[in-house]
């Protein structure tokens, strides 16, 4: 069964190329251009991983994380945050309780590595 | 000049002196005159007695014969003759029985003056006694003295006592004689006294009164204004008491004149110094205000202060408190009165205080001043001096600079972030094509996409460097100093470089000194430095070795990287670590920030960084880290 990954990024072109990339890697990829749409998609599709842009107009990445974490049904979903704000991304992820982040522009290999690591860990947890 | 209140001759000291002297003189003169008179009287009295004795000798015999012979006529003429002598005032002749037989002139009987009996002779002693002729008793004040002598007649060898003769005389006779001498003496005394009086007065006036009056007049007219015109001349010659007074007076005037001149000089000097200070104070371009610490009111200010406060005159400023010129609230939000009190208290404790103060002009315009506040004391009153520097322009410029710097940082930050997102999209899109995810490519297409990739990466590094430098420039760089081994760090940087540029792997020569001590540094930052230096070395030399070495110095570890490139122009070496200064030998574009970032990081480690280069032979970059 294909893993389902949801990307939320206000940058439509990046969203598009990332979706192509993820599909190429064999994942079931979904995309949303803003927080509210993303949350709707999360509830509808229950993705295995969320890739979330930190800077978005209106509801930003941190707000989305907070809403996901507050919802008992969604709070287990792992999140990878991506951001162009190299200075604040680390502090931001720490305060949100997120372990993994990537800075834009990122290497495709790094992203793949991070996704794989996330699913591997999940698998390990399931086994144990 | 005559004294206003001349002293009359009666009250003159000369008269007083004269009175005293003449009192004594009179006493002595009168005593001497009386003495002289007494002596004279005595002398004349004895002279009278002598005369009486002489009369006795002259008339003794004649009288005895007349009595013996009972010759009335002769006796009468003798008595008459005797009475004619001025010494004799009366004569009485007594017979042996004690009866007066002849009397004449003024006689006394038993001490009682009988009076002038003329001449009466009764030689026989019969009938009435002559003394009974007059019983009328006269008295006068003249002292009577007598001379008695016996009458005896010698015949046939026997002596018969015939009776006694008494001659009368009195003091009036003596006085008669003394009178002229006495008059002469008195006259003499009076004349001498009067003469002396006038002579004394004349000379006392000449010698004492005049000089003393001229002295008095000089003293009276003396004032501090006419010291030059007043001078005393007592008009005496030689050294005497008046001369002493004159000298002392003149020397007193001299001293006064000197002290007046001295005082005038001092006053003038004081006035000049006061004026100088006033001028310096008034013409100073630095506004200065002086406040009385007790009342907290301004007591003085200079023209510059009036101008900077935008008031019309000094009087508008004096009397007001500092708060009249202050904004109600200072920059930090503290109310001006509380803040002012704080600074004033500090200044009163003797410390000069410098602070910035937001002022307000009468029209409400705000202006900034740097205030230098210090306290000083003037005759027990504590004053505070405010020197104001109008720093409004500076302050605004500073604000503008800060705003500009903030804007620049903000701009760089935003631009970097805004560049990153599209860069990420381009990178991802081209990667997808290049990796043939979307279909196979021919070699030419692949090559083009490789070029695109390398330039996308360069652009990414550029953005990173700009952001990094901005961070350093804004002082926001955080360092994480830990004990590290520099050789290990170099190895890590080497591995990264080989991964990024495998084509130059063979050129990289690592020649490290083993067992170097640990050094405290931020590993990530040092790797950044190493990567920058290595990539520079690669960039500026197409081929040839890039030698990386470490060595141990006394207190530091020295790192060096030698390339075989074109080297750096000497004039460029100086600026090589300054941002955006590419060398002329530049081949591949960089951010111009790499070396500047290296320098900042090494300086933050208290290390040194420099370059040695020879044109055409290559460059060697060095840096050190303290152990």
Image (tube, coloured by chain):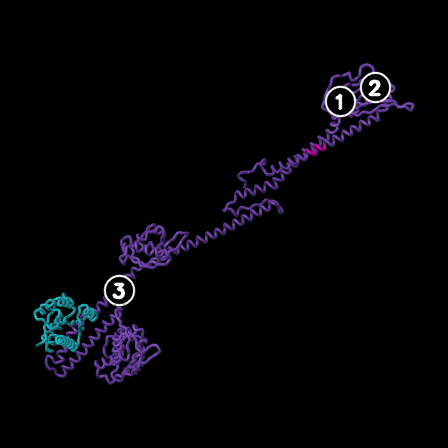
Chain colours: A cyan, B purple
Q: Is residue B465 left or right of residue B116?
A: left
How far apart marks 1 and 3 lie (CA) works out to 153 Å
Eye-nearest disc, 2 or 3? 2
Using the image, determine if residue B406 lies above or below residue B59.
below
The chain to which mark 1 is attached is B
Q: Nearer the viewer, residue B94 or B467?
A: B94
Tell me which chain the residue with mark 2 is part of.
B
Closer mark to the observer between disc 1 and disc 3: 1
| Residues drawn in magenta | B30-36
The reply to whether the C-beta atoms of the residues labelled 2 and 3 are less than 8 Å apart is no
Q: Give x and y (percent) for residue B436.
A: 12, 80
Q: Which mark is residue B412?
A: none
- For residue B377, what is the image quadrant? bottom left
The mark nearer the N terminus, 2 or 3, is 2
Q: Which residue is mark 3?
A: B402
Residue A113 appears in which quarter of the rendering? bottom left
Q: CA separation, marks 2 and 1?
A: 20 Å
Secondary structure of the residue carrying tag 1 is loop
Whether residue B377 appears in magenta in the rendering, the answer is no
**Mark number, residue B111:** 1
Q: Can you identify the residue that label 2 sits on?
A: B97
Category of crowding for the residue at label 2, using alpha-carbon neighbours closer than 10 angstroms: few (below 14), some (14–19), many (at least 20): few
Asked which secondary structure carries label 2, the reply is loop
Count numbered badges in the picture: 3
Label 3 residue SS: helix
Residue B35 painted magenta: yes
Residue B430 vs residue B622: left or right? left
As drawn, B493 above or below B61:
below
**Which image quadrant: the N terminus of chain A?**
bottom left
Which residue is situated farthest in the front direction here? A128
Q: Which residue is the extreme one toward the top?
A: B127
Residue A112, given in percent of the width and then of the height, sits at 15, 77
């Amino acid at each position: 069964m294909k893993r389902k990954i949801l990307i939320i990024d206000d940058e439509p072109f990046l969203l598009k190329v990332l979706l192509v990339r993820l599909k190429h890697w064999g994942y079931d990829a979904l995309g949303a251009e803003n927080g509210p749409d993303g949350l709707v998609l999360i509830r509808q599709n229950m993705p295995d991983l969320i890739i979330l842009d930190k800077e978005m107009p209106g509801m930003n990445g941190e707000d989305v994380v907070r809403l996901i974490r507050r919802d008992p049904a969604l709070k287990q979903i792992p999140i990878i945050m991506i951001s162009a704000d190299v200075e604040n991304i680390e502090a931001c992820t720490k305060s949100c309780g997120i372990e993994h982040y990537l800075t834009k522009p990122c290497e495709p290999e790094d992203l793949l590595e991070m996704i794989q690591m996330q699913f591997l860990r999940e698998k390990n947890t399931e086994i144990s | 000049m005559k004294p206003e209140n001349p002293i009359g001759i009666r009250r003159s000291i000369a008269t007083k002196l004269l009175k005293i002297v003449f009192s004594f003189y009179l006493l002595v003169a009168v005593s001497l005159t009386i003495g002289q008179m007494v002596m004279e009287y005595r002398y004349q009295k004895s002279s009278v007695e002598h005369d009486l004795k002489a009369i006795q000798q002259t008339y003794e015999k004649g009288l005895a014969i007349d009595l013996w012979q009972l010759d009335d006529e002769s006796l009468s003429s003798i008595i008459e003759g005797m009475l004619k002598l001025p010494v004799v005032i009366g004569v009485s002749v007594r017979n042996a029985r004690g009866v007066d037989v002849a009397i004449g002139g003024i006689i006394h009987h038993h001490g009682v003056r009988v009076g002038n009996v003329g001449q009466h002779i009764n030689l026989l002693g019969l009938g009435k006694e002559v003394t009974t002729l007059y019983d009328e008793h006269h008295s006068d004040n003249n002292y009577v003295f007598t001379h008695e002598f016996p009458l005896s007649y010698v015949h046939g060898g026997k002596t018969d006592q015939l009776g006694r003769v008494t001659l009368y005389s009195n003091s009036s006779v003596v006085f008669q004689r003394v009178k002229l001498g006495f008059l002469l003496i008195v006259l003499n005394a009076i004349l001498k006294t009067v003469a002396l009086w006038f002579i004394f007065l004349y000379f006392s006036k000449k010698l004492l009164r005049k000089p003393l009056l001229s002295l008095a007049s000089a003293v009276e007219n003396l004032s501090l204004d006419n010291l030059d015109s007043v001078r005393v001349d007592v008009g005496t010659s030689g050294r005497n008491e008046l001369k002493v007074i004159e000298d002392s007076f003149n020397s007193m005037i001299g001293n006064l004149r000197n002290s007046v001149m001295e005082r005038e000089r001092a006053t003038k000097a004081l006035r000049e110094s006061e004026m100088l200070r006033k001028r310096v104070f008034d013409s100073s371009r630095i506004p200065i205000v002086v406040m009385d610490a007790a009342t907290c009111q301004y007591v003085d200010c200079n023209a510059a202060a009036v101008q900077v406060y935008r008031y019309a005159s000094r009087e508008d400023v004096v009397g007001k408190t500092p708060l009249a010129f202050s904004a109600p609230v200072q920059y930090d939000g503290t109310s001006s009165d509380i803040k002012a009190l704080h600074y004033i208290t500090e200044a009163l404790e003797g410390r000069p205080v410098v602070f910035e103060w937001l002022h307000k002009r009468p029209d409400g315009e705000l202006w900034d001043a740097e205030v230098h506040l210090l306290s000083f004391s003037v005759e027990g009153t504590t004053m505070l001096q405010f020197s104001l520097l109008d720093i409004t322009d500076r302050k605004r410029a500073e604000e503008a600079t800060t705003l500009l710097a903030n804007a620049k940082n903000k701009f760089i930050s935003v631009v970097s972030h805004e560049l990153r997102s599209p860069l990420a999209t381009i990178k991802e899109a081209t990667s997808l094509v290049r990796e043939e995810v979307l279909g196979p490519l021919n070699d030419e297409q692949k090559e083009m996409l490789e070029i695109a990739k390398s330039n996308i990466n360069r652009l990414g590094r550029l953005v990173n460097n700009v952001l990094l430098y901005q961070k350093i420039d804004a002082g926001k760089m955080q360092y994480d100093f830990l004990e590290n081994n520099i050789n290990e760090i170099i190895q890590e940087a080497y591995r990264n470089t080989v991964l990024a540029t495998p084509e130059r792997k063979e050129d990289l020569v690592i020649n490290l000194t083993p067992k170097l001590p640990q050094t405290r540094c931020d590993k990530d930052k040092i790797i950044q430095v190493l990567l920058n230096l290595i990539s520079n070395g690669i960039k500026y030399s197409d081929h040839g070795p890039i030698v990386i070495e470490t060595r141990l110095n006394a207190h530091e570890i020295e790192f060096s990287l030698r390339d075989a490139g074109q080297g750096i122009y000497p004039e460029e070496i100086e600026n090589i670590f300054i941002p955006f200064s590419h060398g002329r030998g530049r081949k591949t574009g960089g951010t111009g920030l790499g070396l500047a970032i290296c320098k900042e990081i090494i300086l933050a480690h208290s290390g040194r960084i420099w370059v040695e280069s020879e044109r055409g032979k290559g460059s060697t970059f060095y840096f050190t880290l303290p152990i």
